[in-house]
């Protein structure tokens, strides 16, 4: 995941797992979350 600030000319990058853990406030299991979203969308 990356965020570019045109105003400051800065690119900030984070590993996806670290970003999601930070946003959730706790470690998450990415495979479980993918399965949950898949089930909600009705896909396999």
Image: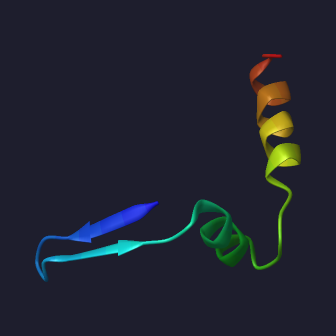
Which residue is drawn at the image coordinates 50% and 71% (left, top)?
Answer: 14
Q: Residue at x 13, y 83 (%)?
A: 8
Residue plotted at (78% across, 28% down): 38
Q: Is residue 8 left or right of residue 1?
A: left
Residue 23 image offset from top left, x and y in percent: 65, 73
Residue 18 at x, y = what percent?
65, 72
Please say if 40 is above or below 26.
above
Residue 22, by quadrant, is bottom right
- Give coordinates of residue 16: x percent, y percent: 59, 61
From this view, report whether residue 28 is shown above or below residue 44: below
Quadrant occupied by the C terminus = top right
In the drawing, does residue 1 fall left or right of residue 25? Answer: left
Would residue 35 appear left or right of 6 to someone viewing this image?
Answer: right
Looking at the image, residue 20 sits to the left or right of residue 43; the answer is left
Give the x, y percent position of residue 5: 21, 73
* Residue 7: quarter of image: bottom left
């Amino acid at each position: 995941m990356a965020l570019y600030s045109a105003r400051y000319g800065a690119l900030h990058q984070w590993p996806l797992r670290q970003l999601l853990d930070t946003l959730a406030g706790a470690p998450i299991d990415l495979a479980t979350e993918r399965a949950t979203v898949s089930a909600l969308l009705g896909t396999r």
